[in-house]
Image: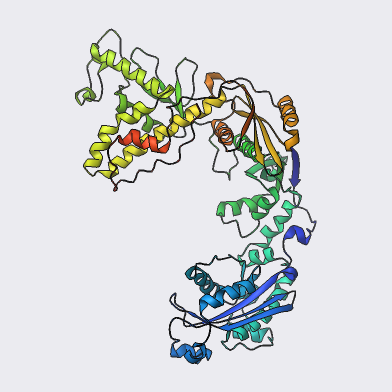
Amino acid sequence: MVWFMAAPSPAQLSFEDLGTHLSEVTFCVVDLETTGGGKDSCITEIGAVKVRGGEILGEFQTLVRPDTPIPPMIQVLTGITNQMVAGAPDLAETLPRFATFSAGCVMVAHNAPFDIGFLRRGHEQLHLRWPRPHVVDTVAVARQVLLADEVRNCKLSTLSAHFNAATVPNHRALSDARATVDVLHGLLERVGNLGVHTLEDLAEMTARVSPDRRAKRRWAADAPEAPGVYWFEHTGTDADGRAQTEVLYVGKSVNLRRRVRAYFSSAEKRSRIHEMVRVATGVQFLECATSLEAEVRELRMIASHSPRYNRRSKRQNRLIWLKLTQEAVPRLSAVRRVTDDGTTHWGPFTSMEAAREAMMVLQEAFRVRQCTTRLSARTASSACALEEMGRCPAPCLLGDGVTEHERAVEEVRTAWNSDARGVLRSAQPRLARLIAAQRYEEAGVLTSRLTAFHATSVRHHRVRSIAACRQIVGAAPVAGGWEIHVFRYGRLAAAATARTSAVQRVAAEAVATAATVVPPPHGHPAGTWEEAERVATWLELPGVRLLDTDGEWSWPLHAGLPTDRLALELLGDGALSPALDLDFGPIPIEVS
């Protein structure tokens, strides 16, 4: 684990750190002539000049036979007639040749969306792979660097005259491409005076990334190209004049340098992150051994600092649970805290609404009482309307209702502890009636509740299974070796990487130096449930090998079902109506 810190510094980065220097970029300056500007228009001529460091490397020019006649107005404008293109190659022959000529180049065009749009559509029509090149639009660059009183507009003829281009544009592809080369060189000379020296700088300037934001990119200079956690900070003073540091945002990445640099480029589109970067006074890094360690440390830092610009994972400990109350006639209750009263707490849920939806599923499946009245086991009380509707066995009346309700409570415990199929099967008759009546919207709501219940069951047992193990040591193959993790009660205790020949030795060292984890109460994970879920996801990855387990990593076979079996439990043997779209989503694997 290695610490890094970046703060404002006057140090100048090398070109390698900044990106690709413009003098080393191979540009392919292209111009097209077409039959018009619509989507149904065709290319009639392609002209291009390949240039690098001011030196022309090659030229490309060809007429293209269009699928439709050239309109008279276009013939007058370009001088390209139907007779001229009659014997020219078609697009299917021309486009692959141009693709070979321009391969690996940065594409440049004047009003690039027009020309690049035609080339992209041509690739799609011919079922060719579009290479998604980096594109520079000389119109966009000119609008950024030329003052309003310098040129009256940004037309190619105007700019070529302004920069004294050697070729006068005349609406022929190669001539216009040559003129655009001179315009490009004139613009690059201007942006160089503004401190734009790399291709990345040019893209950011075109996207109107502020100079202050670009200047902060030097903060990423010391970041390693390795997995880890980064956090932006703001250092100021409190009311007493003492230095005070606030963590603004925490993130993780498999490549810290590349990820942090992206915050100061046009790749970052989020307005709140723009504000965060503007407020920040520095960024720090923590290099991690594996990407999972980076994920976990990000979660722990967010939970610890609650950064104001993070949205996810800020409520890791604010969970909701369902429990059966400890009273003569138990009922379902949604609680925010796990109590040590011997009852099963099932969940968790991230919102009270989700918990109540699950409670409703159980109440409808097993007819558990819904009232909150504290009932006596000896004294009868009056029944409510739910008894008349057949939705409650009315244990308040004593008699058979008490026995039936006790059975329902046991079915709830079974659904929580071992077998969720009873809940799913109980909804079959109602779901079939809704489908038969073509009430697909109501059927969709019911299905959504049931699949949410099923997902919670999977989550509950999946996490508790690893939380029950005192220690699990696993290894997963990665490029160059293996990732090794030590988990204790569902919490990451150590992480390391090793060559294949040293896996056993490194694993033993990781176990020896792993953090001590106190056994958690109630069968819950030692860390947060979100961390335990990340651990479970890693353990379930293809290729993970268990080097050691202390405990029984298992969960009930019927606590979660594969997608096809889940659909069968909900729908029975009946045919599924094509008008009802039931999306059960991905179901985690079963471990038995």
In the figure, 210 relative to 570: above or below? Answer: below
Tell me the residue at 76%/59% (across/down).
Answer: 16
Examine the image and state in which quarter residue 60 appears: bottom right
Residue 562 in the image: state x and y as whole percent.
Answer: 43, 35
Tell me the residue at 30%/45% (across/down).
Answer: 580
| 506 vs 328, nearest the viewer | 506
Tell me the residue at 34%/35% (across/down).
Answer: 568
Examine the image and state in which quarter residue 359 appears: top left
241 sits to left or right of 375? right
427 sits to left or right of 102? left
Protein image colouring? rainbow
Whether residue 374 appears in this view of the structure is: no
In the figure, 209 relative to 343: above or below? Answer: below
Residue farthest top in this picture: 378
Examine the image and state in which quarter residue 95 appears: bottom right
75 sits to left or right of 142? left
Q: Quadrant of the N terminus?
A: top right
| 51 vs 224, nearest the viewer | 51
Whether residue 434 appears in this view of the structure is: yes
Residue 121 in the image: state x and y as whole percent.
Answer: 49, 71
All told, the count of numbered labels is 0
Tell me the residue at 55%/72% (across/down).
Answer: 116
| 489 vs 68, nearest the viewer | 68
In the figure, 418 relative to 76: above or below? Answer: above
Residue 533 in the image: state x and y as whole percent.
Answer: 54, 33
Residue 442 in the image: state x and y as whole percent.
Answer: 28, 41
